[in-house]
Amino acid sequence: MEWCQVRTNPERRQALIDGAIEVLAREGARGLTFRAVDKEAAVPSGTASNYFANRDDLLTQAGARFYERLQPSPETMAQLTDGPKDRANIVELMKEVVGRIEAFRTGYLALLELRLEATRRPELRAVLTERVRADLEFNVRNHVESGMPGDETSVRLLYLALNWLIVDRLTLPGIFTEEQSIELIEAAVNRLVDDDA
Amino acid sequence: MEWCQVRTNPERRQALIDGAIEVLAREGARGLTFRAVDKEAAVPSGTASNYFANRDDLLTQAGARFYERLQPSPETMAQLTDGPKDRANIVELMKEVVGRIEAFRTGYLALLELRLEATRRPELRAVLTERVRADLEFNVRNHVESGMPGDETSVRLLYLALNWLIVDRLTLPGIFTEEQSIELIEAAVNRLVDDDA
């Protein structure tokens, strides 16, 4: 049990969680075993079982890690708070966030695996629901406080449209080209954000 | 091989594919074996292997079956072609399609499993890409020809936003209530469809 472990260290824990993300993306949720994670992180067999109470604990921490690794850069946050208060800037911000998520391909695929696994595991579902809700509400609050055009509904509808755009781009890349993807982001912002708001 | 099978029949084939959808939703892509499908469809062990060339063949047919089972009713098609040419009617049509997909919960979850499996299987990816593209283009063409307000981009952006709404509703139902879901559908149509178009 965790309270009696002494030989754990934060770097190794993080390496194991990052390994779990790669395993989830590559093998699916059912492929995620402590043994597979040990192998992925190139640590001795039995290591992961020292760091996580059980498989649910590991799944939950992998979900939290996705959001941790996707934190916007200080530059992006500054562009939101100090940049021009217009739709053109929102387009740039949305392109940046879609690009950032697409660049962490395995992380997003792992999160989709976790969502499907959540339909089978109530505890994981509760934790993920809380995390996704907090992330969405953070974005809503941030946007409204930034003084940018657009209301709460604009943010929620952008969240919906851009998430599925990323699903298409990562799972069936033949659906929308890079150029079409950019056009869809621009159209989504232009239509969902009222410039007079 | 298929050309030398004589004892296959269409009803049983369909029952096996429907069984595969249930197994995919419940166990994930890695849980989909011929043995699991035989069990789900309550047929003698070894039956599925007589009907499908291999696992890829079964996965592909499960994807096609999702679209087959989700065909809009003649009433819905009539509402599109003969109903009022206004946004209020589009809202009703979108509520109907979201409700229809949510009601086939296991089918949609199976399709998400197939999308993730498609990242690992180029052949499945090619078939799914073709199917999703055809479905989207059918909707775009249908909408434009119906004389309803809204353009091609409206249809594509509604496709994006409503798909992720369904993902949230089916995987993390605590994110949006039924009421919020309906408000989001209304707001999506009102903002994405230009009434003067």
Image (cartoon, coloured by chain):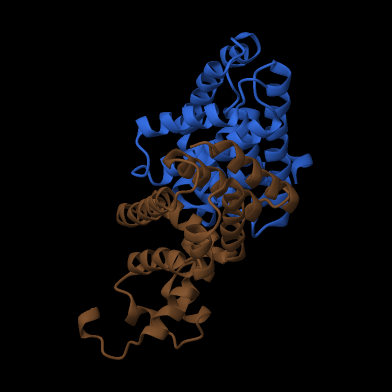
Chain colours: A blue, B brown
- Residue A35 horizontal/vertical position (percent): 53, 50
- Residue A100 horizontal/vertical position (percent): 50, 27
Residue at left offset 68%, top offset 57%: A121
Q: Is residue B54 above or below residue A61?
A: below
- Residue A66 horizontal/vertical position (percent): 59, 35
- Residue A147, located in which quarter of the rendered image? top right
Residue at left offset 35%, top offset 30%: A179
Residue at left offset 33%, top offset 68%: B57
| A140 or B61: nearer the viewer | A140
In the image, is B45 to the left or to the right of A43? left
In the image, is A89 to the left or to the right of B122? right
Can residue A7 be seen at all in this image of the molecule? Answer: no
Q: Is residue A9 above or below residue A123?
A: above
- Residue B38 horizontal/vertical position (percent): 46, 80
Residue at left offset 39%, top offset 51%: B145
Q: Quadrant of the N terminus of chain B?
A: bottom left
Can residue B56 be seen at all in this image of the molecule? Answer: yes
Q: Is residue B154 above or below residue B136?
A: above
